Image (cartoon, rainbow, N blue to C red):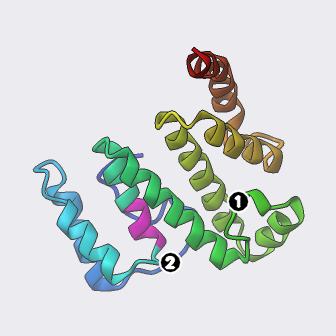
Amino acid sequence: MDLLDFDPTPLYFDDPLAPEVEGLLQIAADRYAEDQAEPYLMRAYFLAPHQLTVLVAVYRYFYYRHCLAEARLTAQRAMDEAARRLGFPQDWRDLTDQLLGSGVHRSMGLVRFYLMALKAHAYLDLRASELAEGCAKLEKLVTLDPMDRMGGRALLAVARARLPDIASMDAG
């Protein structure tokens, strides 16, 4: 996916943007290479904090700028917003197959978005050396996605392989 492409078409939700917000995202995309995108993204966020397209744009910006703590916070906000829209519990640990199924009846695309945000958040946990938390999220993802359409299994295997290393460092 192109970093500068903030077009909502390839995303998993249908959420029309206000013209002012869309304009701000376009300016941010145009100014990304000059390292001048952040003020426009933040203005778009303040105008539309529940807009998923805005959250994705902010997440991508922070992720690709290696501001991983900010990307992690944004991934959490995206999960919270998707959970609210789907009627999911705010805590991902409380999500069940039954709730996931009811979410699919509301919006399969939004369920995929939620699961992708969960995976992104787990990955950022791993990058922050919070391996147990990242693994727990990936285990939940794999449980909810037994066909592995989100690709959580491989990431979970890599994370689990690192857990003994971290445990031995903590013990020493």
Using the image, determine if residue 15 lies above or below residue 166: below
Determine the residue positioned at 66% across, 54% down.
115
Q: Which residue is mark 1?
A: 92
Q: Position of residue 1 (x, y in %)?
A: 42, 46
Q: Which residue is mark 2?
A: 15
The image's mark for residue 100 is none
- Left or right, 50 with respect to 161, comes to left
Mark 1 surroundings within 10 Å by alpha-carbon count, few (fewer than 14), some (14 through 19), many (20 or more): some
- Location of residue 171 by image quarter: top right
Q: Position of residue 58 (x, y in %)?
A: 35, 61
Provide the residue span drawn in magenta: 52-57
Viewer-side residue, 65 vs 130: 130
**Residue type for callout 2:** Asp
Q: Secondary structure at mark 1?
A: helix
Does the CB distance between marks 2 and 1 fall below 8 Å?
no
Question: Is residue 98 among what the camera can see?
Answer: yes
Question: Residue 55 colored magenta?
Answer: yes
Question: Residue 12 colored magenta?
Answer: no
Viewer-side residue, 149 vs 138: 138
Determine the residue positioned at 68% across, 46% down.
137
Determine the residue positioned at 49% across, 57% down.
75
**Residue type for callout 1:** Trp
Q: Mark 2 or mark 1, which is nearer to you?
A: 1
